[in-house]
Amino acid sequence: MDRPLFAAGALSAAIGVGAGAFAAHGLKDRLTPEMLAVFETGARYQLFHALGLMIAAWAVARYGTDAAAWGGWLLLAGTVLFSGSLYLLAVTGVRWLGIVTPFGGVAFIVGWVLLALAALRGGGASAP
């Protein structure tokens, strides 16, 4: 379970960097400042949570708990819902996509809480 989460985190980081570069160089003159900020928020959260996916992978390997695995998958789902909806909202201007964004935020929050629980309750090897 740790390898797929780590790979998803690394791939998400690559996509997040690409999205940030695309915003800075390809969208700067095409979007309003408000929509550019929306797009950049999606990229920023994607990058933060890409690191979170790698932390989740480490936690799965370290603690071997379902909470760590579920936490990681919720961070991935949150990225798709939160960042994905912001990217689409900014590029298309379709406002109803903003309804999806909070669901991604909730997935982020629950994912981080599950990672905290995994750390507090998890077994695995003891620290050196």
Image: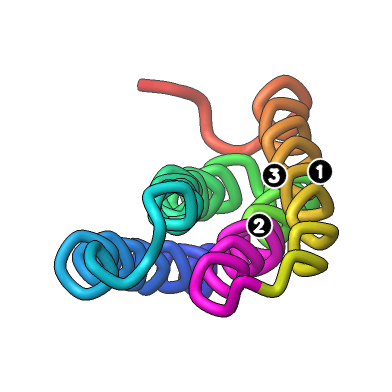
Q: Position of residue 37 (x, y in %)?
A: 42, 47
Helix, strand or loop under label 3? helix
Q: Residue at x 81, y 62 (%)?
A: 100
Outermost left residue = 25
Judging by the rendered image, the residue that carries numbered circle 2 is 82
Q: Which residue is mark 3?
A: 108
Q: Are marks 1 and 3 in contact (CB under 8 Å)?
A: yes
Residue 16 is situated, as x and y percent measured from the top left of the image, at 35, 63
Residue 11 located left or right of residue 84: left
Q: CA distance from mark 3 to mark 2?
A: 9 Å
Q: Looking at the picture, tell me which residue is in the foreground, 5 or 100.
A: 100
Q: Which dot marks residue 124?
A: none
**Which span of residues is magenta-colored?**
76-93
Question: Mark 1 = which residue?
Answer: 106
The mark that comes first in sequence, 1 or 2, is: 2
Residue 126 sits above or below residue 115 on the image: above
Neighbours of disc 3 within 10 Å: few (<14), some (14-19), many (20+):
many
Label 1 and label 3: CA atoms lie apart by 5 Å
Residue drawn at the location 60% of the way across and 51% of the way down = 60
Looking at the rendered structure, the kind of residue marked 1 is Val
- Label 1 vs label 2, nearer the camera: 2
Amino acid, disc 3: Phe
